[in-house]
Image: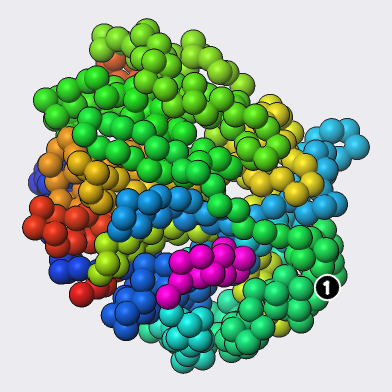
Amino acid sequence: MKTILFLVVVTVLFNCKSNIENQKTIGVITDKAMVVSARKEASEIGSAILKKGGNAFDAMVATELALAVCYPYAGNIGGGGFMVYRKNNGEIGALDYREKAPLAASTNMYLDTNGNIIPNKSTIGATAVGVPGTIAGVFEVHEKFGSLEMEEIMLPVIQLAKKGVVVTEKQEKRIRKHQSGFLRANKDSILFQKKWKKGDTIKYHALAATLERILKFGKDEFYRGESAKKLADFLQKNGGYITTEDLAKYKAKWRKPIQFTYDDLNIISMSPPSSGGVCLSQIMNGIESFDLDKYGHNTTKTIQVITEAERRAYADRSHFLGDPDFVSIPVDQLTSKAYAKERMQDFSFKKATSSSAVSHGTITLVESNETTHYSIVDQLGNAVSVTTTINGGYGSKLYCSELGFFLNNEMDDFSSKPGIPNMFGLVGAKANEIAPEKRMLSSMTPTIVEKNRNLFMVVGTPGGSTIITTVLQTILNVHEFKMGMQEAVNQPRFHHQWLPDDIKMEPNGFTKTVTNELKNLGYQIDETKAPVIGKVDAILILPNGKLEGGADPRGDDKAIGF
Ligand code: GLY
């Protein structure tokens, strides 16, 4: 018995040690161009577009659409996203192709006559769907910055859909996990109800036909043409709100990104309706004056400082942020260094702050974590950072078999009822209440980092509310702790979001000494329920000008370039 116990202890210790220490990998290195995304097939298509002379924006269109084919879990044409870019001349900008609430939406649309949330109405099926923005987004990017013909960009994607995509082990598990959701959301049997196994090939003929029509007739096909009519009809028949008028009115919007400094870095990230850039700047402003590099990577002191800055930033997040076309947001104040200093004034290394003592205090935040990010640098030095989503895994689970894609459940990112958590635990505030044509608040944080005014890093991740803190730790791993890109991506991560008042930590990623020290200081630690925190796809410009990819081993992610 003693021997068995000894072996178990040794095995556990060995596993912990290997999870913590076996992270020093060097990523794919290329001379001048790279695409890093959630699937090999999408990175290959994006990289091939660059190789034939396309720029990062052409590759964005190709990669986004390829992910809609090969990564239906989160890649989409039935959802939306955000792109942050930096051209090789230093010009920066951002595109918002986030979904919108339909015209028929109203503040209380997910409440019953007693004012209670109607379970699942904002998460499963047609009632959960926001007006999709992805096709408007890719056409907007192509019109403004594209250099290749749309045909050259889209044909490889259409071919991929026809040829089919091989199921990976992780994908097999995901499809299996969501079977009950598919059954619940769809009246008829859908492609994904088959028991797909690793190594099978799924062919996407309906999606290929939709993409062919979009190629022939442009974005109007999706928003005003045959596809628009079919989509609105399908959603109405399934009890949804979206009409042909909603689709015809959808427009992607160019936004001014959030920009702030941290030491000698200039960080460019997504502005509202995403909370990503504002929140990231609040946290980084809060920790800037602390010597994290001296405290060391993932040590008690470092985790304390980051946690306390996160606690304070997330306390502000949902109170102040929403769609800037509908609510006025004090962005300059929230992102100022003086405000961050003031917020951190009551921080002490001696004891954890209690979240109940931190204003603004009416919001719990747990979003769904099924989104996807890709990073691109082209041979000319242009960079794009894109995060795109249908919100939940396979979105609303509602699949339009005729058009060949899943619809989002992004309406759940609104606060259905201020003060009351939705299915994902989200308790929102007035700034993010539902209104017709409003965009729902997001956490997506596509980010580009400059060092000495030169392009330094392109980074982003899925992960709902953990997106912001994952992007933060990836940047810090490189800047403060001198890691390479892949090494930075591989590191164990932690997350605090004010409420619930605990630090979520990736299991087996942190030493017992650190977790015990944190507990003794009054921090609640959640290593048991903590899911994978983020799935980063990033690119680092090395001192010799080459690119290092960081493709997250937590998924099937892949860096490809030349
Ligand atoms: N749907 C997740 C997000 O936008 O943050």
The stretch drawn in magenta includes residue 458: no
Q: Which residue occupies 65% across, 55% down?
A: 99
* Residue range highlighted in magenta: 135-147
Point out the image quarter for the N terminus.
top left
At label 1, counting other C-alpha atoms closer than 10 Å, the crowd grade (few under 14, some 14-19, many 20 or more) is some
Q: Nearer the viewer, residue 215 or 423?
A: 215
Residue at point 84%, 33% (across, down): 115
Give the quadrant of the C terminus: bottom left
Magenta stretch: includes residue 144: yes
The picture places residue 98, in percent across and down from the top left corner, at 60, 53
- Residue tagged by mark 1? 233
Q: In the image, is 398 to the left or to the right of 463?
A: right
The number of numbered badges drawn on the structure is: 1
Question: Image point 10% across, 53% down: which residue?
Answer: 543
Vertical order, 208 against 75 (above or below): below
Seen in the picture, residue 93 relative to 562 is either above or below; the reply is above
Residue 68 rendering spot, x and y as whole percentages: 52, 72
Q: Secondary structure at mark 1?
A: helix
Q: Amino acid at mark 1?
A: Asp
Q: Is residue 535 visible?
A: no
